[in-house]
Amino acid sequence: MKVERVKYVIWAVDMNRALKFYEDVLGAEVIKRSEVISEVALCGSIIGIHGGGEGGRTWTGMSFQVPDVIIGAAEIKAAGGEITRDPQPENGEPPHLAMCVDTEGNEIMLTRKRG
């Protein structure tokens, strides 16, 4: 079998809102745009965004490493996302984790590189 490409697919109730979130907040590049399935590229990865989502919460398993999770979480909230676990200091170190939800109900994680 020849695998041509790997992408992770999430759901969206509102495709334009989803694309705007990933483009504006995370700096993704929109590489395909349609109402059925769109794609964004981010740090060498492809995220497919499938229309027709119902807006329910879905754990994606996606983690985005950022320099500062406090600032990142604030940006997600300002863009219409939610924070389900605020960044907390741990063992005397700055926060390294924030649990978030994008505008479409997809649960994502922000992390900071440790050590």
Image: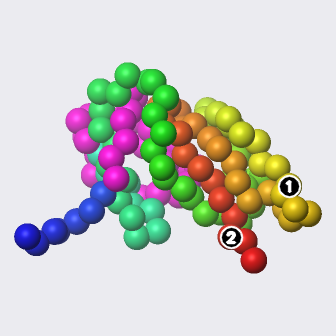
The residue drawn where x is 28% and y is 52% is 32
- Answer with the quarter of the image where residue 31 lies: bottom left
Which residue, given by chain and number where applicable, does mark 1 sit on? 89
Q: CA distance from mark 2 to mark 1?
A: 14 Å
The image quarter in which residue 37 lies: top left
Residue at the right extreme?
Answer: 92
The secondary structure type at the circle numbered 1 is loop
Does the magenta-highlighted stretch encompass residue 35? yes
Mark 1: amino acid: Pro
Give the image's coloring scheme.
Answer: rainbow
Quadrant position of the N terminus in the picture: bottom left
* Three-letter code for the amino acid on which mark 2 is drawn: Lys
Residue that label 2 marks: 113
Left or right: 92 as drawn, with respect to 99: right
Q: Residue at x 84, y 58 (%)?
A: 90
Q: Residue furthest bottom?
A: 115
On screen, residue 37 above or below 72:
above
At a point 69% along the width and 64% down the height, the residue shown is 112
